[in-house]
Image (spheres, rainbow, N blue to C red):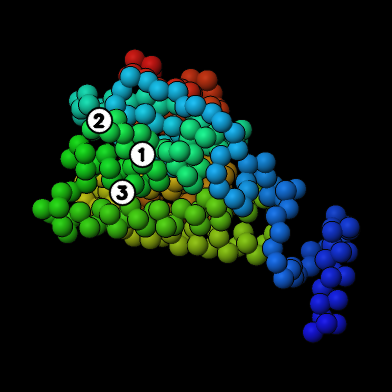
Amino acid sequence: MKELRHKCFIQLELRSQYRDYLPMTEYIPPDVWKWNRDSGGKFASINRPIAGPTHDAVLPKGNHPFQLYSLATPNGQKVTIMFEELIELGIEEAEYDAYLINISEGAQFGSGFVEINPNSKIPALVDNSGDKPTNIFESGAILVHLAEKFGKFLPPPSEPAKRAEVLSWLFWQMGSAPYLGGGFGHFYAYAPKKFEYPINRFAMETKRQLDVLDKQLAHNQYLAGDYSIADIAVWPWYGALVLGRIYDAAKFLSVDSYKNVIRWAREIDTRQAVIRGKRVNRAWGPEEEQLHERHSRSDF
């Protein structure tokens, strides 16, 4: 055992000194993991193994009952699309203020944001429509909160079978997205170096998920009957993927083979609420597609 540990130590020392010159070798984990601030690729500056704020930052507040702090990533788009869908139905009580949280600059670690979401991930919502403010984080939880509050896009408890199907697909997305975003997206698009094993592993899982969706949509216009929070949650990830808008991986994953997913993605893409919701808190791309803050429908 002592000899094995010595060999491991020598190998790790050589790898740290000559990693740019040696071919890829099997990684031997140390006895105790230690955080390397220089690793992590594109997001190294904002990733860390601890929670809590890094700086004091008071969040801005608008005049509407709902205060959203977010960014137009797929998870952020879920909530802005939901708000815009409610407003599209004429529900004035769903008006909201949306403020940009630039995660590439570490704004999610400001004290005000962490107070709403101790996990320091967008989106985060404050609902001031009740007797006292309610903080909600996790995009799925926000969708359920809004759907139940306004009685839209989620069947009521009096229809348990339909409600269960919508919630099943919602939680399927919440559980699957880490494979698509944190797994495939990271190793295929963002990792400092590309390695075959993790890309193959997560590409396989991503394609399996696309096949799950394709089979469900073969006999359904939407995922769970009527258009619902399930579609609103799944579309910004898998719809954007098959439409060629994230990771530039459409060809690599042969998305053209998922005909039903493409049909569904294109149909949702034409909804006016979706068109607006995609723009909110967007800070990249063509200027006409950006809307850093949203305070009223006239902002569009």
Using the image, tell me which numbered label, if any, was put on residue 230: 3
Can you tell which quarter of the image residue 128 is in? top left
Q: Residue at horizontal 39%, vertical 31%?
A: 68
155, 116: nearer the viewer: 116
Q: Name the residue under label 1.
A: 135
Picture coordinates of residue 246, whole percent (x, y): 53, 42
Which of labels 3 and 2 is toward the front? 2
Look at label 1 and name its amino acid.
Asn
Instruction: Relative to 185, say whether 97 is above or below.
Output: above
- Mark sitting earlier along the chain (1/2): 2
Picture coordinates of residue 134, whole percent (x, y): 31, 37
Q: Residues within 10 Å of mark 2 (few under 14, many from 20)?
A: few
- Please indicate whether residue 106 sits to the left or right of residue 16 in the image: left
- Mark sitting earlier along the chain (3/2): 2
Look at label 3 and name its amino acid.
Ala
- The number of numbered badges drawn on the structure is 3
Q: Residue at horizontal 56%, vertical 56%?
A: 183
